[in-house]
Amino acid sequence: MARPTRLAWWHLLITLVVLVAVAVGAVLLGAIDLGWQRVLAEVWAQLTGGVSPLSEQESAILWQLRMPRVVLAGLVGAALACSGATFQGVFRNPLADPYLLGAAAGAGMVVTIVVVLAPGAGVAFLPAAAFVGALGGVALTWGLGRSAGAGTATLLLAGVAVASFLTAVQTFVQQLNTLTLQQVYGWILGGLSTGGWSQVLSALPYLAVALTVLCTCSGLLDVLTLGDEEASSLGVRPGVVRLIVLGAASLATAAAVSVSGLIGFVGIVVPHVIRLLFGASYRVVVPMSLAGGAIFLILADIVARTALAPAELPIGVVTAFTGAPFFVLVLRRRQS
């Protein structure tokens, strides 16, 4: 058996440097030029208790608008990309991602129900509600796929059916209260424009737990690619591993969806690019997808808020423009 590729730490270090550079660039870009020297001086002043070089308005723009938005984009991108990579490992299909397996649709349906029927539930409650929906969506897909027959193609078709059904339920619930339609539609298209520290803090505990579990289990996904019998002979319990990984990936997806809405294709585009650059071992793909997803979504958010400035595109539209052609390309490569 070939030894799985280990994570090259210098690859991760370079990727993290790129992530920091992209994040700093995203913070500096905007209608009001804060200047990188003044921003650095402001950060230093906050760390040392010195005098701020920014006005009160500029300080609010930096700390209350741009910083939380960039952090939120990074967290959501990392969660969606990492979840996509692990779903692909569990189901042994490179086209699997949270949106094709019903996780995002389930999370979206439950969050919509909460927003429409219990608007006073609070932001902190949404990730937990979304997790219930995501887990239910994946469970429905898995159960339907297994009952319909073996094969990952059957599983993905079941995922499409489940996602369509859950989306239909979501649409029906929206019609129950037209006063919240605009809020729900804005959330469905995906966006970070209203993201603040409260959204970051509400999702962070769930993401920390889920992403830690996924990175820890990445080596076991390499063992699952050998087949269940071979994995069992190596001391791995495939059913238990799948249950843990699916639960963690669903939790990461739910936390991301609850604070950003439905942002598609991150879970397909990023893991495939990571495989092309660094190899197919999940020991590498999962942790590198975490950093790569953050870079991808921060860049997508820059495009969303600058392409038609002062108007803003929904970030889900930007990722769809990138992801849809990429999905078709991956599909054609598999067919050939």
Image (cartoon, rainbow, N blue to C red):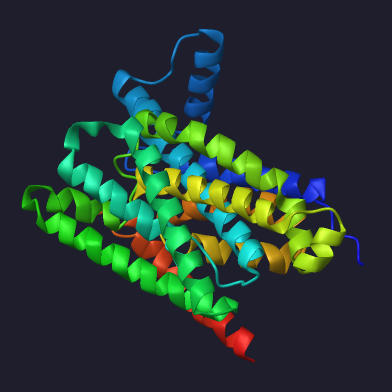
Query: What percent of the width, then of the height, locates residue 194?
Result: 29, 40
Judging depth in this view, the residue of 23 and 186 nearest the camera is 186
> Would you say 102 lies left or right of 237 here?
left
Q: Is residue 34 visible?
A: no
Query: What percent of the width, then of the height, locates residue 324?
Result: 44, 74
Q: Name the residue: 79% across, 60% down.
A: 223
Judging depth in this view, the residue of 52 and 194 nearest the camera is 194
Dividing the picture into quadrants, the one containing residue 40 is top right
Judging depth in this view, the residue of 26 and 218 nearest the camera is 218
Q: Name the residue: 14% across, 52% down.
A: 182
- The extreme bottom residue here reads 336
Query: What percent of the width, then of the height, locates residue 239?
Result: 67, 57
Q: Give above or below for 156 relative to 4.
A: below
Q: Total number of numbered labels?
A: 0
Quadrant where the image shows the N terminus:
bottom right
Q: Give above or below for 285 relative to 50.
A: below
Judging depth in this view, the residue of 293 and 306 nearest the camera is 293
Quadrant where the image shows the C terminus:
bottom right
> Would you say 251 lies left or right of 239 here?
left
